Image (cartoon, coloured by chain):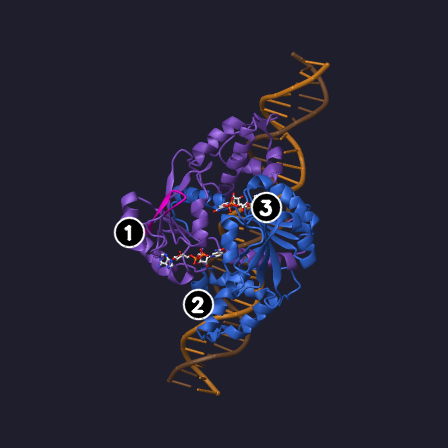
Chain colours: A blue, B purple, C orange, D brown
Amino acid sequence: MAQEPVKIPQATARRLPLYYRFLNNLHSQGKQRVSSAELSEAVKVDSATIRRDFSYFGALGKKGYGYNVNYLLGFFRKTLDQDELTKVALIGVGNLGTAFLNYNFLKNNNTKIEIGFDVDESKVGTTIGDVPIYHMDELQEKLVEQGITVAILTVPAPVAQPITDSLVEANIKGLLNFTPARLNVPKTIRVHHIDLAVELQSFVYFLKHYPITEKELI
Amino acid sequence: MAQEPVKIPQATARRLPLYYRFLNNLHSQGKQRVSSAELSEAVKVDSATIRRDFSYFGALGKKGYGYNVNYLLGFFRKTLDQDELTKVALIGVGNLGTAFLNYNFLKNNNTKIEIGFDVDESKVGTTIGDVPIYHMDELQEKLVEQGITVAILTVPAPVAQPITDSLVEANIKGLLNFTPARLNVPKTIRVHHIDLAVELQSFVYFLKHYPITEKELI
DNA sequence: AAATCTTTGTGATATAGTTAACAAAACGTC
DNA sequence: GACGTTTTGTTAACTATATCACAAAGATTT
Ligand SMILES: NC(=O)c1ccc[n+]([C@@H]2O[C@H](COP(=O)([O-])OP(=O)(O)OC[C@H]3O[C@@H](n4cnc5c(N)ncnc54)[C@H](O)[C@@H]3O)[C@@H](O)[C@H]2O)c1
Ligand SMILES: NC(=O)c1ccc[n+]([C@@H]2O[C@H](COP(=O)([O-])OP(=O)(O)OC[C@H]3O[C@@H](n4cnc5c(N)ncnc54)[C@H](O)[C@@H]3O)[C@@H](O)[C@H]2O)c1
C-alpha cells in the first residue's frame, strides 16, 4: 500500500541491492517466477522479512503465485536508480584502493569509480583498471569539474581527517571510510565506516563467546 | 552489576574492538582518565550508549571522575582475548586477498593471517607480507595440521560454495565471506558476509533517498 | 466449477537497540 | 569537612527490526 516516497526502513534499504542481485541471477537462469520462500533460501533472509520489505513498495506479488521475476527486476531497477550512474572518487591508491580500482563495481551496479587520487608520484599519471590517478593537489579542481559527490577513503589513518576536510570543501555529499579513523564532518554529510579490522576482531569475539545455540547467524 | 559470563548484546560486542582501539590511542597520548562524553566524541557513539555498553561488564568507572584509561584498557585486553592469538587462513590471493595479506591486522589486534591458499601456480610457493601461499590441494591437510578454524574467503563467487564445503570438512568454525555468494553451511558454523558491492550500492541509495534531516548518520 | 493447494500481505507480537533523564556517588575546591 | 560540580550507572521510554501466524486471494488440479 505504501508508495515509494514514503521512507523505507534503513534495514530494508540495505537489503535492496542484495535482492536485486539475486533477482538478476534468477533472471539469467531463465526463471519466470519466485516465491519469498525460494528467495529466502537464496539470500539467507527470513521469508517474512522479504515479504515485509517488498510490501513497503506496494503489492508486488500475487497470492498463490509469488513474484514475477521480470516485473520485480524492473521495479527494483527503477527504485535503485540502476539506469543512472553515480560517479565515485577513490582517495588513496594503496593496497586496498588498488583492489577496489581493479574490481569492476559496474557489473550489475550503478556506481563507478571514475577517478583516483594519491600523493605518491609513482602512481600519479598512471591508470589502474581504466581509472586515471591524479595528484592530491588537483583534488578540489577535478571533483568540482566532474561533479563528483561520493568518495571512497583508503588512505593511512593519520591523514584521513585533513583529507576529509578538503573533500568537504570540494562539496562532497557522502564518504565511504575504510580507515580506522572516526571522522568529523558537518551533519549534512553522510559518512559510512567500513572498519575491516573491527569486523575481523568482533567476528573472532563472537566465535569465542557466542558458540552458536541461538539462531543468530547474522 | 552483570558479570562477564552473561551474554552481552551483539551490538555492544561489535563496538568493543572500537573502544579498545581508541583507548589505546588515548593511552599512547599519555591520558590517564576519560569520560564517556570524551570517548563519545572520539568514537562517534552516543555517550549513554558507551556507559550502557561498559555497564554490562560491571561498574568500571567512578562517578564524578570517569574511567581510568589504564584500568579500562587492561580490562578490555582480557575481555577481547588480546593476549591470545587467533590464527586465520585466507583463501583466494587475488586483488582483495593480497591487500589483506599486506595489511598488518596484528597491529593492536589479536588475529593474524597465518596462511594463504590459491590455485594460481604463479602464487603458490610465494610469500606475501610474510604469509606463505599454498595450493588448494593442501587446504585440508594444512588447516587441520595448524589447527586453524577461522577463514577469510576472497575467491571468485562461483567457486565460493564448493570451497566452503571443503572448509567445513576441514573443521572450520567461522568464515568471513567477502564474495557476493550467500553460503550454505551447517548451523554450527558462523558466517559473516561483508559485501562491499552491496555496501557501496546501499550507501548511494541512502544518499539519494535519505537527504539527511534525521540524526541517523550511522 | 468445485475442491484443494499455495503464497501473499499484514496485524500482532516479540526481540533488539538507543537515548533521555536523573539520583546517587565521588571528585575537587575552598 | 562542607559545598558545588562532575559524571557514572540505570530505570524508563522510545525507536527499530524481525518474526509469527493466518485470513484472503488466487493458482492449480480434478
Ligand atoms: N589493506 C587492508 O586490508 C586494510 C584493512 C583494514 C583497514 N585498512 C585501512 O585502509 C587504509 C588503506 O590501507 P592500505 O593497506 O591500502 O594502505 P597503503 O599504505 O597500502 O595505501 C595508502 C595509500 O594512500 C596514499 N597516501 C598517503 N598519504 C596520502 C595523502 N595525504 N593523500 C593521498 N594519498 C595518500 C599512499 O601513497 C598509499 O598509496 C588504511 O587506513 C588502513 O588502516 C586497510
Ligand atoms: N576486489 C574488490 O574490490 C572486491 C569488492 C567486492 C567484492 N569482491 C569479491 O571478492 C572476491 C575476490 O575479489 P578479487 O577482486 O580479489 O578477485 P581476483 O580475481 O583478483 O582474485 C581471486 C583469486 O582467487 C583465486 N582462485 C580462483 N579460483 C580458485 C579456487 N578454486 N580456489 C582457490 N583460489 C581460487 C584466483 O587465482 C585469484 O587469485 C570476489 O568474489 C569478488 O566478487 C572484491
Q: From the viewer's perspective, is the residue at label 3 or at label 2 nearer?
A: 3
Which secondary structure, mark 3? Answer: loop
Q: CA distance from mark 3 to mark 1?
A: 43 Å
Horizontal side, residue B128 vs residue B198: left or right: left
**Can you identify the residue that label 3 sits on?**
A119
Whether residue B36 is visible to the viewer of this picture, yes or no, is yes
In the rendered image, the vertical position of residue B7 relative to residue A29, given as above or below: above
Label 3 CB, ligand 1: below 8 Å? yes
Q: Amino acid at mark 3?
A: Val
Mark 1, Cα crowd under 10 Å, few <14 / some 14-19 / many 20+, is some
Residue A103, image x, y percentages: 50, 58
**Can you identify the residue that label 2 sits on?**
A38
Task: Assess whether residue B133 is covered by the magenta stretch.
Answer: yes
Q: CA distance from mark 3 to mark 2?
A: 49 Å
Mark 3, Cα crowd under 10 Å, few <14 / some 14-19 / many 20+, is some
Q: Amino acid at mark 1?
A: Gln
**Can you identify the residue that label 1 sits on?**
B140
Q: Which mark is residue A87?
A: none
